Image: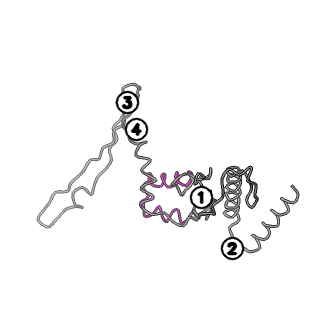
Amino acid sequence: MADDSMSLLETLRKVSAEGEIDVLREGVRLLAQAIMEAEVTELTGVPKGERDPEHRRTHRNGYRERRWDTRVGTIALDVPRVRDGGYLPSLLEPRRRAERALLAVVQQAYVSGVSTRRVDDLVRALGIEGISRSEVSRICAALDTEVTAFRARPLGELAYPYLWLDATVRHEAPFDRVGWKGPPPGCRSSPVKLGAA
């Protein structure tokens, strides 16, 4: 245990001395790699580099690169492969590049009215390499099922003490010989709130 903590301290000193490496991002990457190596060791039956035909269930088959967008930025992972192709890391979701917290941020930005183009600027500010407009649309498509369920819910079973209606009243300026007396029709509008029913 003492050797592990000394090697960790040594690694932290080395990383902070270099200055260019983000310690938190590098720590997440190292932890993710260690988790994947432990899972593949359990799957194959023997640790990496050891030969034990009696206990081996399958063979390693190299690595594949995969980007993983996290709250600490984009991390490049080397995902181990096995020959039968039956390994998916537990910390990654199939066909998803981002973690759930980041997906929630993108969805909240979309609901708040941030355009799909501006979401790219937002995720770049978070330290992620970027996100395409089509990816934002795909992520936010999950909201459609929730909105549909909300809109289709039965209203008769619940008691509603208040009913709020929201309306927009349009005031149009009359046209005279010189031109418009005010802004074009539809530009002046005011919201009207109706009271309780």
Q: Earlier in the sequence, mark 4 or mark 2?
A: 2
Pointer 4 residue: 149
Residue 25 position within the rendered picture, expressed as x and y whole percent measured from the top left: 66, 63
Pointer 2 residue: 20
Q: Main secondary structure of the magenta part?
A: helix
For the N terminus, the quadrant is: bottom right
Which region is colored magenta? 100-124
Amino acid type, callout 3: Pro
| Residue 103 covered by magenta stretch | yes
Q: Earlier in the sequence, mark 3 or mark 4?
A: 4
SS assignment at label 4:
helix
| Picture residue at 67% right of the left edge, 55% below the top | 36
| Picture residue at 13% right of the left edge, 62% below the top | 176
Pointer 3 residue: 154
Task: Say whether marks 2 and 3 touch (CB < 8 Å).
Answer: no
Q: Earlier in the sequence, mark 4 or mark 1?
A: 1
